[in-house]
Amino acid sequence: MSILLILLILVCIFAIYSIIPTLVIRAFSIGIFKSAHIKNKAALTFDDGPNPSYTPRLLDLLKSHGIKATFFVVGENAKAYPEIISRMHREGHTIGTHHYRHISNWLLTPREVKEQCRLAAETIEMITGKRPVYYRPPWGHLNLFVNWASRPYKIIMWSAILGDWRYKLGKDKLKQRLHKSLHEGAVIVLHDSGQNIGADQLAPEMMLQALEEFLQEKNDKIEFVPIDVLCQHEESKESLIEDNLNK
Ligand SMILES: [Zn+2]
């Protein structure tokens, strides 16, 4: 068999395991949560932290506006900065997992996905005493078995991802995108750390400035709530439909 044919087969196997399931699961929302049909509520979510420079400032900002958010933290960062995780928990934010290390599901076997979720969840539970319920895959990458391998955690994706990991996007453009993406039931992703591949280290500085101005300018009725509120609203709607069908 020629090397070219072997390469082609390997590329096909990789696509079937990683890229195709990511596209299909996202397009048809199979086993994932992206947004809710709920009045006057939306969720702000922050990935990749905690970061010792930016996350405490973000927590100060959220506190000054009375906002409860959701943090999808990387397990090894949580282990390095447990006092920031304790503060998130104390101040009423929801903490979900974002793997123990920021590794793509495209490069992990199902067993490794399970291990990454378990290790991150155990680290968070050790600090807060509360086992996380929610999981966001790094880069939003899924694979053929992720729905099974990540159980019992609920996979949370988003209705808006704004490119805030690039510093050159700029504060004004990000603020514009925040205003545009905000609607009832929206799940918005931002990043409170710029340490991962593809991100700019200073990007969270720009994000914090944009978020601060956006929150000052925002004059609608939409209240930011933790992801739990949106998920539970959708679940209660589904069980109501099931009850009605069973009657
Ligand atoms: Zn991430």
Image (cartoon, grey):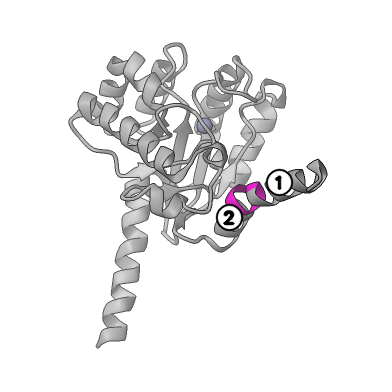
In the picture of the structure, the residue carrying the numbered disc 1 is 11
Who is closer to the viewer here, 165 or 17?
17
Count residues near mark 1 (Cα–Cα under 10 Å), then give few for <14, some for 14-19, many for 20+. few
The residue positioned farthest toward the bottom in the image shown:
247
Residue 69 against residue 30 in the figure, above or below: above
Query: Which residue is depicted at the point 61% across and 23% down?
Result: 197
Q: Is residue 230 above or below residue 139?
A: below
Q: Residue furthest front?
A: 1
Secondary structure beneath disc 1? helix
Query: The disc labelled 2 sits on which kind of residue?
Result: Pro
Give percent across and percent down for residue 127. Answer: 23, 24
In the picture, which quadrant includes the C terminus?
bottom left
Image quarter for residue 200?
top right
Q: CA distance from mark 1 to mark 2?
A: 14 Å
Q: Is residue 53 above or below residue 120?
A: above
Residue 160 appears at what percent x and percent y? 58, 45
**Image coords of residue 43 (percent x, y):** 43, 44
What type of secondary structure mainly makes up the magenta span?
helix
Q: Position of residue 187 (x, y in %)?
A: 49, 47
Q: Inspect this view and state whether residue 131 appears.
A: yes
In the image, 228 versus 37, the foreground residue is: 228
Q: Residue furthest top?
A: 53
Q: Quadrant of residue 91?
A: top left
**Magenta span covers which residues?**
14-19
Q: Residue at x 41, y 59 (%)?
A: 38
Q: Is residue 4 left or right of residue 204?
A: right
Residue type for callout 1: Val
Specify few, some or many for label 2: CA neighbours under 10 Å numbering under 14, 14-19, or 20 or more.
some
- Dot 2 corresponds to which residue? 21
